[in-house]
Image: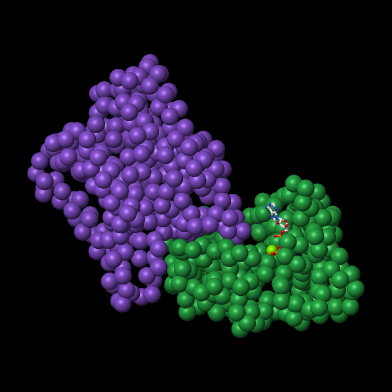
Chain colours: A green, B purple
Amino acid sequence: MATKPVLETRSLTKSFGSLLAVNEVDYRVPEGELCAVIGPNGAGKTTFFNLISGKLEPTAGGVFFEGEDITGFPPHAVVKKGVGRSFQITNIFPRLSVLDNVRIAVLARRGKTLDMFSPIEKHTEEQDEALEILGEVELEHKAHHPTTELGHGERRNLELGITLALEPRLILLDEPTAGMSIEETSSTIDLVKKISHDKTVVFTEHDMSVVFSIADRISVLHQGSIIAEGTPDEIRNDDLVRLAYLGEEV
Amino acid sequence: MERIPNRFGVTVLLGLAVLAPVLVQNDYYIQLCTEILIASLLAISLNFLIGYTGLVSLGHAVYLGVGAYAFALLTKNVYPSMWAGLIVAGASCALLAWFMGVFCVRLAGLYFAMLTLAFSQVVYTVAYYWRDVTGGDDGMLGIPKPEIGIPGAFSISLESFTNFYYFVLIIVAVLIFLAWKIANSPFGRVLQAIRENPERVEFIGLPVHRYKLFAFIIAGTLGGFAGGLYSTFQGYISPDLLYWTQSGEIVLMTILGGMYSFLGPAFGAGMLLFIRDTVLNFMEYWRIVVGGILVLLVLFLPGGILGSFEGWISRLSIGGNDGDETRS
Ligand SMILES: Nc1ncnc2c1ncn2[C@@H]1O[C@H](COP(=O)(O)OP(=O)(O)OP(=O)(O)O)[C@@H](O)[C@H]1O
Ligand SMILES: [Mg+2]
């Protein structure tokens, strides 16, 4: 409880016209925890991630990473600070090879992307590291294929691989299992658990059994506001949450 | 997938280029080959933006024109040196691209295209009306072909068509090689990533605007060298070089040859100029022929001519490939 939060938002607010997509959210993520943000469709989860990662500028409030105010930083600057994210809608480089998708992120992290005169293949350290990451997301055998040959689940894994390649200290995963089959979901969830051993992770997920089995903490977003926060047990027994969201499910 | 020319293809091409003056044995065709070389550099430079970075510029003639005027002004009014002329042509275009790029790279798609078009038309207008410096619509005549060499030691005259051809071949080959290096570097791959998905590039921690600006400056500088070469090649220039139809022609070369193939635009440049010269002999409306070919291409070979050809080759040879087919 006493450890200083890795991520903190203060009264974070985003309105789209008259719609308050994120409404005065105060949120703290302690170091090393695996935190879930749940809520029904349209609750504001993605918008919340967009505000933290710099994709959107907040209407009001602030975002603090490791104590530093990063409100309004552009996405590339937020990444450089150590915050990586993945996207709910797969966001990869379609006509590059699977390897290049990850390699370019590794090169970016290591500050090699302004190198204009040595062939990209000569950067063997980065290539090996990229292949290792592809191994983690079970895509090593497809390294030299174009992404167009990947199935949906594989594309989701590549999405994750690109984010891992950045070695972020805080990692935001927006529905990493979106659209996956049951087997794919379980292997991805295993991976998320593994990642969380040495990183702070915030993720969203619609499958409640997954959320309640792996998360250290759960925050429930409802119409842009956090209506409950706590351990899985606390959330399971929260009347407000049952009423607003969980319904029959738990 | 990106298609990078293989060693065999490049050797053949280079061999042909070196032997061309011997093979054609005709001053007229040597000049046509020289022009094709210059246009190849120009089209490849534009393709840094279109094919690599995914930015469709409709104002690339601005570098052809500005590079040409810079060369002419320097060699006629200040100092008649080939090297100084070319360096000033490249440098002035680098500066111009930097300036325009700061505004252009913030935009994408049609807005980017429109702004590049607008900038080039502004420069055209300046060249047209600033008679004292540019000669207005009369243009500039008598641009020299200064000899090259080391003063006092030796010098080579470039007045003969063949000598001049080889001079241009060397300059263009060096610059295209440089462009090829850049295209295959980590930086070049970032440009391709920007073409594919600029948002995600931001989210791997890279400032997309800055990378686009670098691409813009590289394209402009290479274009400026092409402009300088064109200036001394023709010996006269006019504001027509800067007109938007000229920009359109460079885009056509790129698409004809194939924008996802490194040498595609050069191939397109050769084709376009060859068609112009042969068709022009029996009808004035050579652009109809080019237009017709373009329509057929877009319908049946959207990868461009060289691009599609390379595609077939790599599909045929996929068995003997070391698994790197994604980049060959
Ligand atoms: N760019 C935008 N412009 C206008 N409204 C938006 C924008 N982005 C999101 N919204 C609205 O904000 C609300 C929250 O959307 P958001 O995508 O954050 O929800 P979510 O919790 O991620 O939903 P899901 O579970 O479906 O992914 C929705 O009503 C959505 O329509
Ligand atoms: Mg969402």
Q: Residue furthest top?
A: B132
Image quadrant assignment for residue A6: bottom right
Point out the quarter of the image occupied by ligand 1: bottom right
The N terminus of chain B: image quadrant: bottom left
The one of A183 and B246 positioned closer to us in this rendering: A183
Q: Where residue B136 sits in the image (x, y, percent)? A: 35, 19
**Image location of residue A51, percent across then percent down:** 73, 55
Q: Quadrant of residue A201?
A: bottom right
Q: Nearer the viewer, residue B121 or B157?
A: B121
Q: Position of residue B33 (x, y in %)?
A: 20, 43
Q: Residue at x 20, y 50 (%)?
A: B17
Judge whether A249 appears above or below A59 on screen: below
| Among the 4 quarters of the image, the one containing residue B321 | bottom left
Q: Quadrant of the C terminus of chain B?
A: bottom left
Q: Residue at x 40, y 27 (%)?
A: B124
At which x and y percent is residue A215? 77, 77
Q: Is residue B130 left or right of residue A107?
A: left
Image height check: is A204 above or below B219?
below
Instruction: Give the total number of marks visible in the rendering.
Output: 0
In the image, is residue A167 above or below residue A65? below
Near-viewer residue (B218 or B299): B299
Residue at 42% x, 39% y: name it.
B58
Q: Residue at image x 86%, y 65%?
A: A227
The one nearer the camera, A84 or A216, is: A216
- Residue located farthest toward the left when viewing the structure as drawn: B25
From where the camera sits, is residue A169 visible?
no
In the visual, does A40 lie left or right of A229?
left
| Residue A250 seen in render | yes
